Image (cartoon, grey):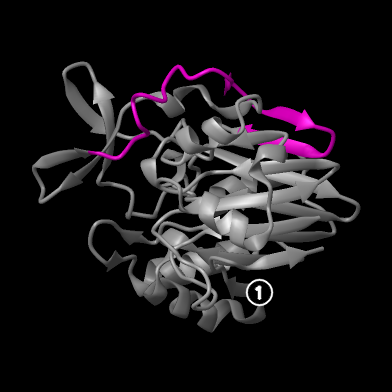
Amino acid sequence: MKITVLVENTPKDSSIKAEHGLSFHIEACGKKILLDAGQKSLFLENAALLGRDLAAVDFAVLSHGHGDHAGGLTAFREINPSAPIYMARSATRRCYVKKYGILFFNAGMDRAFVGAPGIVPLDGDKELAPGIHALVGFERKANYLTTSVNLYMRKGLGFKRDDFSHELALVIREGDTACIFSSCSHSGLHNIMGKISDVGLLAAKNLVFAGMHLYRAPGTQTESPAILDRFAADLLAFPDTTYFAGHCTGRIAFERLSATMGERLKPLRCGDVFEL
């Protein structure tokens, strides 16, 4: 299995550009997969730099409907018109971020992309190919994280807090290893991991690539130390699991988690390549 980080907030070095967003190129189980596509077209530039042919991708997967993950899908469709694009059915709905306590700004995908050919909406969990699983619908059993409370969706002529039913996690099993991708973890990574465990997809060795959404955009308000310590303990409860955290995790939260999680927490950066 080979995992290439095409887009993330922080560059690995000066040879590659970064942006607020995520995109992965994954080679696993005999398939080439694009997971998310960043904000616009930077993922294409970085893919070329890193030697990844996106025209050869077998299928794409969208983790959720926010623009910093879905924004590049129009560009992807132009260079790869045939690959299916899997996403939760509700990923195309209108998403918003509330700023300044009163104003709602669009946070969703380009409306021109909604209804594009090749979108495959998922109403439940699905094995996309042997060993490659898309999971949707995460019960927030331990709902103590606060940094997604400014994210909304439409309800009639008004707004209500997003229920994140449009969130999807990707789990890839090869041999005794499971690679888990949870790009923003708005439902809480601990809750997402709980479902993955419940459906029997954890392995003897687990690698989790995630944005943990522990600070609130557009500012830098981070979860409290007490909440971060509880969150770290919940993640450590999953044995034989290493977490690679980036994107919406935030520097302050990462440093706090590191104090508890030690070598089981590592940074995720644009340009990183993992060969397993």
Locate residue 250: give its quadrant: bottom left
Locate residue 219: give its quadrant: bottom left
Locate residue 161, reporting x and y percent: 28, 35
Q: Which residues are magenta?
A: 106-135
Q: Is residue 113 visible?
A: yes
In the picture provided, is 147 more to the left or to the right than 44?
Answer: left
Identify the residue at horizontal 65%, vertical 24% (top origin). 82
User: Is 10 located above or below residue 129 in the figure?
Assistant: below
Q: Is residue 236 visible?
A: no
Q: Which residue is mark 1?
A: 264
Q: What amino acid is at disc 1?
A: Arg
Identify the residue at horizontal 46%, vertical 70% (top origin). 10
Identify the residue at horizontal 19%, vertical 40% (top origin). 105
Locate residue 191, reporting x and y percent: 55, 47
121 drawn magenta: yes
Locate residue 100, reporting x and y percent: 10, 51
In the picture provided, is 3 more to the left or to the right than 42?
Answer: right
User: Is 56 located above or below residue 3 in the figure?
Assistant: above
Identify the residue at horizontal 71%, vertical 61% (top origin). 207
Locate residue 244, reporting x and y percent: 60, 66
Considering the image in quadrants, where does the C terminus appear? bottom right
